[in-house]
Image (cartoon, grey):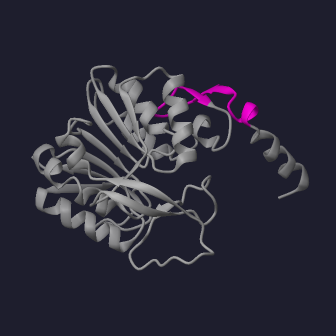
Amino acid sequence: MSLARRLLVRFLRLPPVACLPVRVRSGVAAGAAWTLFPWSAYWRGTHEPAVQARLVDLWDWNGRNVWDLGSHYGLFAVGLGRRVGPAGSVAAFEPNPLSLARLRRHVRRNRLPWVKTFPYAVSDHSGSQRFFAYEGLENTSTHLAYEGETWNESIPTISVESRVLDALVAAGEIQPPDFIKLDVEGHGHKALAGACLTLAAKRPVILMGLHSDCERDGILAILDPLRYRYSPIDPAAPLPPGPGFDYLAEPLA
């Protein structure tokens, strides 16, 4: 990166500049109030355009209940929150504290009280877990430990709280979902393992981003007995589903 670009990025990261108001140009959150920097692809409308287009055309969102698992800055939480309206709900989960702060700012800026934000990782058990941040908390690859991943003192981590989704439903903290966006950096199978009762009862549509064979195998082991079909967002993506691609999982009648 050139010196001029490094200086520009440093300037844009200054809190008063980074939080300047902008509007999302297109996609699922078109017209929403946003912040200038970083991840400007969100408001410019260039982030995962095929995914966003699929969601816009999926159905009439009004009154739907949504879970956004791995919300980051809240592009989908805000976009779908504006679409479901006050008759619906969005439960947005984001354990990364930097991302969570920006998510909450965007929810407030768009006046969406029916979008509830949670500072938790979703998993198959509740408790404190190690959260890996190899390239810092601003990176989108922060994650709970993968199977077999070991930690040493050279790897930056923080402690985050994990929660089980079925327990949150039983406690009345979140509504059973009509739709789930699942993008939790390789932990999706454990997130859904903590929601098996709700999945069996509600059979929601699920947009899932797959990151590993282990995550894929675990998710399919949960969804296949519930009679789901899978369609790739990218027509070139493999079937059965493979890691590195996004898929829409829809329950068969």
Number of numbered discs on residues: 0
Q: Residue at x 61, y 42 (%)?
A: 41
The N terminus lies in which quarter of the figure?
Answer: bottom right
Q: Percent from the top left, x then y, of residue 60?
A: 28, 27
Q: Residue at x 39, y 62 (%)?
A: 210
- The magenta segment is 15-34
Residue 232, image quadrant? bottom left
Q: Among all residues in the image, which is located at the extreme right?
A: 3
Q: Is residue 51 above or below residue 90?
A: below
Give the camera-side residue of 193 and 29: 193
Left/right placement of residue 77 relative to residue 38 reads left
Q: Percent from the top left, x then y, of residue 64?
A: 26, 30
Asked if residue 211 can be seen in this view, the reply is yes
Q: Is residue 88 above or below residue 219?
A: above
Give the camera-side residue of 200 and 30: 200
Q: Percent from the top left, x then y, of residue 16?
A: 74, 31
Q: Residue at x 12, y 56 (%)?
A: 226
Asked if residue 236 can be seen in this view, the reply is no
Left/right placement of residue 199 relative to residue 58 reads left
Q: Is residue 132 above or below residue 208?
A: below
Q: Residue at x 44, y 38 (%)?
A: 76
Give the camera-side residue of 197 and 152: 152
